[in-house]
Image (tube, grey):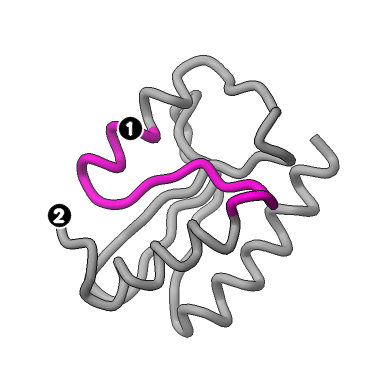
Amino acid sequence: MKNENKYQASLKDKLKVLFPGCIIQKELDIQGTPDLLILYKNKWASLECKRSSKEEHQPNQDYYVDLMNQMSFSRFIFPENEDEVLNELFIFFNGGLEK
């Protein structure tokens, strides 16, 4: 968990640079919802942070990531896919990947 917290803190710093003025809310009160809720301009996204692609998913995480992705944008993010997810998020927040 400690490494995940370090990764999450680093990721939050990157998000603030990529999306100036964004609001990042950490963890909702519902078990299994993604770690980060990002509010930017007139859109929102959620990210579930993992230390690696091999880390187990907790109960309900897949459900909530899928559900929130249907509503807006949601992904599992870890060091191995970070560039890809941040690129997709950048496109989404800037007018692409419309729902």
Q: Residue at x 44, y 74 (%)?
A: 22
Q: Residue furthest right?
A: 2
Q: Residue at x 59, y 51 (%)?
A: 81
The quarter holding residue 39 reads: bottom left
Q: How many marks?
A: 2
Q: Is residue 38 magenta?
A: no
Lower sequence index among marks 1 and 2? 1
Q: What amino acid does circle 2 point to?
A: Lys
Q: Residue at x 66, y 36 (%)?
A: 53
Q: Is residue 18 above or below residue 93?
A: below
Q: Residue furthest top?
A: 59
Marking on residue 12:
none
Q: What amino acid does circle 1 point to?
A: Asp
Side of 11 relative to 85 (left or right): right
Q: Residue at x 30, y 66 (%)?
A: 92
The quarter holding residue 44 reads: bottom left
The residue beneath circle 1 is 66
Q: From which residue to which does the magenta span run?
A: 65-81
**Quadrant of the rendering where the N terminus is positioned:** top right
Q: Is residue 4 above or below residue 99?
A: above
Front-most of residues 52 and 47: 52
Q: Is residue 80 magenta?
A: yes
Side of 42 relative to 77 (left or right): left
Q: Is residue 27 visible?
A: no
The residue beneath circle 2 is 99
Q: Is residue 12 visible?
A: yes
Q: Secondary structure at mark 2?
A: loop
Question: Could you tell me residue 5's position as x and y percent?
Answer: 76, 47
Question: Could you tell me residue 32's position as x and y percent?
Answer: 49, 26
Alpha carbon separation for disc pair 1 and 2: 14 Å
